[in-house]
Amino acid sequence: MAVTRLKRKDRYNKNVSRLEVKNLKLATNLELGSRSQQSTKDQLAKNNAVLAKLVASA
């Protein structure tokens, strides 16, 4: 069976839907529970720690 090339509109829709799913996964809120605790190694946690230090020293 030959692989057919998607038309431009279909390629666009495929990429847009893929990015929408990605954004939805990234935008989900952390819920309380053992599996969704924010890691201390997470970049967001590191950023928050640096900001807290700056605010405390100011």
Image: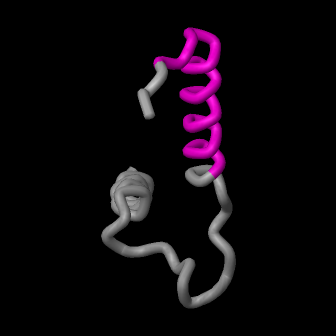
Q: Which residue is drawn at 44% across and 34% down?
A: 1
Q: Which of 48 and 15 is in front in this view?
A: 15
Q: Can residue 49 be seen in this view?
A: yes
In this rendering, is residue 3 above or below 51? Answer: above
| Residue at the spot 43% in from the left edge and 28% down from the top edge | 3
Q: In this view, does 40 lie above or below 45?
A: below
Residue 22 position within the rendered picture, expressed as x and y whole percent measured from the top left: 55, 45
Residue 22 highlighted magenta (yes or no): yes
Place residue 17 in its image quadrant: top right
Q: Could you say which is closer to the camera, residue 18 or residue 7? A: 7
Residue 43 lies, in percent from the top left, at 35, 57
Instruction: Name the chief secondary structure element in magenta.
Output: helix
- Choose between 10 and 20: the one closer to the eye: 10
Number of callouts in the render?
0
Q: Which residue is drawn at 65% across and 48% down?
A: 24
What's drawn in magenta, residue-wise? 5-24
Left or right of residue 28, residue 45 in this image: left
